[in-house]
Image: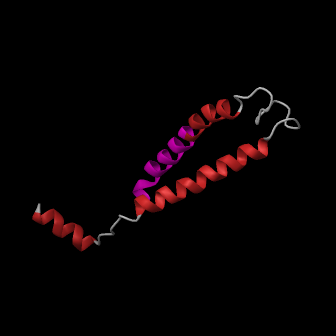
Amino acid sequence: PASFRSVVSSFSLSTTALGSLFVIPLVYLVNANPQQRWVTADLNFGHLDWFFYLLACLMVINIFILRYIGSGFVYLSDKDIEDRIKSA
């Protein structure tokens, strides 16, 4: 609904900020081996493609987790919600 635009926008920006915070330790982790760094200052010497493959794998895992959690969701119609409120 239109009344939730600012709330949804704030959630979107929060998840972007959290994603940025989670990438920082991930970059330190993939750059732990000094002989074979994935993310370097000079992109010609790094393995940035491996880093993006890792991010793609993490996104696929996230989709499966989301599908598992979302499979338990049961949609309630407005009438069902009103019935639950009246019976409470």
Asked whether 10 falls inside the magenta stretch, the response is yes
Name of the residue lying farthest toward the right: 44
Occupied quadrant, residue 82: bottom left
Give whichever of 28, 7 is nearer the camera: 28
**Quarter placement of the N terminus:** bottom left
**Quarter placement of the C terminus:** bottom left
Specify whether 30 is left or right of 11. Answer: right
Residue occupying image coordinates x 46% and y 54%: 5
Residue occupying image coordinates x 60% and y 31%: 25
x, y percent for residue 81: 23, 67
Name of the residue lying farthest toward the top: 34
State the extent of the magenta-drawn residues as a range.
1-18
x, y percent for residue 61: 56, 54
Q: Is residue 13 above or below residue 70?
A: above
Asked whether 45 falls inside the magenta stretch, the response is no
Residue occupying image coordinates x 73% and y 29%: 33
Q: Is residue 2 above or below residue 39?
A: below
x, y percent for residue 44: 89, 38
Q: Is residue 88 above or below residue 58?
A: below
Q: How many marks?
A: 0
Specify whether 84 is left or right of 14. Answer: left
Magenta stretch, main secondary structure class: helix
Specify whether 35 is left or right of 78. Answer: right
Occupied quadrant, residue 83: bottom left
Give whichever of 9, 22 is nearer the camera: 22
Residue 59 shows in the view = yes
